[in-house]
Image: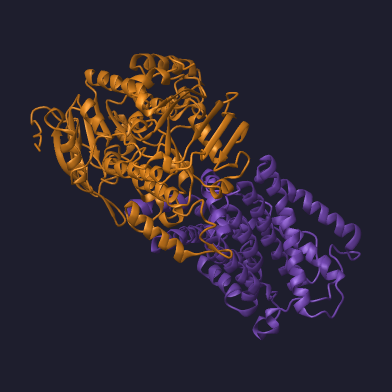
Amino acid sequence: MKRTVEEAVLPALVALLVAAVVGDVLILSFGQNPGSVYRLLIDGTWGNAYGFGQVLYKTTTLTFTGLAVAVGLRAGLFNIGAESQLAAGGFLAALVGLVLPMGLPALVTLPAFLVAAAAGGAFVGGIPGVLKARFGAHEVITTIMLNFIVLALLNYLTAAHLKVEGTLHTTEIHAGALPRLSSMIDAFHGSAANVVLLLAFVTAAAVAWFLFRTRRGFELRATGLQPAAAEYGGVNVGGVWWRTMALSGALAGIGGLNYVLGYKHYYEESFASGAGFLGIAVAIVGRNHPVGVVLAAFVFATMSQGGLAVNAVVPKQIVDVLQAVVIIAVAASVPEVRRLARRTA
Amino acid sequence: MSIVESSASAPLAIRLADIYKSFGPVNANRGASIQVACGEIHALVGENGAGKSTLMRILGGMYAPDSGTMEVNGRDVTGWTTAQAIDAGVGMVHQHFMLVPTLTVAENMMLGREPTSGGQIDSGRVVGEVTELSRRTGLAVHPERKVADLSVGEAQRVEILKTLYRGAKILILDEPTAVLSPPEIDELWRVLRGMRERGETIVLITHKLDEVMEISDTITVMRQGQTIAQLTTRETTPAAIAKAMVGRDVQLAMHYAETARPRADLPSAPLLDVRDLVVDGPRRASAVNGVSFAIAPGEILGIAGVEGNGQTELLDALAGLRPVRAGTITVARRDITRLPVKSRGDAGLSHIPEDRHARGLILDYTIAENLILGQQHRFTTGVRLDNDAITDNARRQIEAFDIRPAVPSVPARALSGGNQQKIVIAREMSRAFQVLLAAQPTRGVDVGAIEFIHARLREARDAGKAILLVSADLAEVLALSDRIAVMYGGKFVVVLDRRDASEGVLGPYMTGAEHAA
């Protein structure tokens, strides 16, 4: 047990260390002092309630997209479509929000939003799943292609039918906006962090439970590890494929609630803005484990918010570079660490 | 038991002394030694998990020893790398093949050292060289066939050829005969003797004592990570080797034993009834070509035959892992021809698959998890897996089948081949079943365990089950089967009563030289 934890955490730590070193060099190249820039980054993220709130807000979406990708990878499926699944979830939730009358109790609206967001994502994710199960179409290709199709479709629907003139977003949703954390804790005032964060933690726990404690999870992981053995074990491999893709899409879709109902209270074109793709990095750095995903989401959210904090002294794109370094370092160090663990054990 | 003194005059081809190697809590080698003179065939024997493969992987540079010294041809090579080992002419043929399935035989041979002419890969030259080597050694392969299309036996020949092609002078073979038919085994012995005459050195990892007696000059016996004895083959006996291996006296010879239970006691309606079965192969039009047979309760039908004659496809089709083109399969009067795998299990079908690494086990799952694979529904309450029941089940099976290490939470990957196979056997024989498909049930399993597995199969038969046995080991087919079918070219060319069968009778049918009317 101890070794598996080490194996899971070590690559991420090594990656962060490498990223810090690369960051030093970049910061020096801009004539700045790394120590003070990092201090600025920490002050702007964990150092004050607003910054921390923004980190938590970003953690929320990344947790969902990270979980989406992680669940897929556990079944041996590489879901590159979290971006459009996230958007579809947010879109459908917004539609439901626009249709529902004002003044309904949260007990009604919340489940409705949840179901709508999950359904939107599950539909977009399920299509590549069915295509793979039925025709053997590779999910990497189909999810990438669907990203273009779905995002364009949603943009069209918004632009043609739903948008407020002069903007890229729908009219405001009045039914059941989700409370922000600042309404409970004053210090978070102004930050977008909202109760969907709690939903993200609950979802991560639920995903962990599903993967490691249920029969379906057992069959899902078996399919990911050795499809031939899963088939021999009576698992309907095609069924696992499409159900997992739908589940993966649903997880990404629920992430759409964070922006649409927790923050802006409307659907806006391209609100996902890369959070779906970053989910791939979150899943890989989190080693496809829900707990790792939450931690990785927090790290990536910190970097993303930190970029804004240091923008005054160095270009915020430095942070994009550092994110890339983390991804590459983790991807490269995983087999390395495993081999090391074997040799020294 | 005589200990062979190393002659101090000529340098030994291989001298490993006092090797220690542990993997986490598992001490694979603890003071293991082996000495092999140049130009001899040396058998390294021991039960599963005795540390034979680990010791040879250390020699091959795949692992570095924790302590101990290694010498090859008198040179200190302690802790060398695989590349250095290959350069020094130490070649290893693994139990599990290391071939690229999508490449041809010749392409696999040249992989990593492709000869070029004018910047292009000169595959013609390789094909020529491989053909020549194949002719010279008697290891028949088609250089231009894809590895994916080869049978297990053919793939093994390619593995051996590849090692020779790369200039191995010291050849290590890990359980080479596990996948070969009797004629193929004879071929292999001929090849190895030829190599010995050319002064090459061979180490054979095995636990088949008849092989040891037939082919080897000297023997190292290992038990629990230690070298127990170093013997000269012509001065010892199989019983003595077996005793050194297991640490107690064991029953060696495999004898057929008819069921103790009177047939009249059992219902006569067949439990497994297969009619006119046609199954498509990977490329050939049909791999199984109209096979019909029935197995009665309390009967073992053994299929003999050289691998690649449709046995794999037949069993896959019966198990629901490959679609049936025509014909019917009935288990306990229930037509299961189109049923999915799980429903077949519910209908009373149990299956020991021939390839435990691809099908029979999920290597990253624990022993406990692997012991419920295919029966996960039985261990589910609501939607949850019942972990207590799974662990209880694991403890019972580990105890009953002597699976080592006896720890339910150890991943199957960490177990030796024989213990992995015990997981599969334990799982498939402990479920409620009427019909058992047993493909290569003792492949890569040690003497003590073979005895045990055979006893279990006979017990199941005596309890009124129907068993279909497929084995590349003809002695095993003869020892267990009540009737024997020979499969050749996708058909049963003959079905004989056990009384009428012997190696001599079956041989011509297996090679296709003879057909029954």
- Taking the image as shown, residue B93 lies to the left or right of residue B282, namely left
- Taking the image as shown, residue B17 lies to the left or right of residue B511, namely left
- Give the vertical position of B309 relative to B245 (above or below): above
For the C terminus of chain A, the quadrant is bottom left
Residue B231 seen: yes
Colour assignment, chain B: orange
Return the x and y of residue B204 as percentages of the image width and height: 27, 32
Return the x and y of residue B510 as percentages of the image width and height: 42, 21
Q: Which residue is at the front of the view, A95 or A18?
A: A95
Residue B215 found in image quarter: top left
Residue A6 seen: no
For the N terminus of chain A, the quadrant is bottom left
Residue A42 found in image quarter: bottom right
- Give the vertical position of A110 relative to B122 (above or below): below
- Chain letter of the purple region: A
Q: Which residue is at the front of the view, A159 or A52?
A: A159
How many numbered callouts? 0
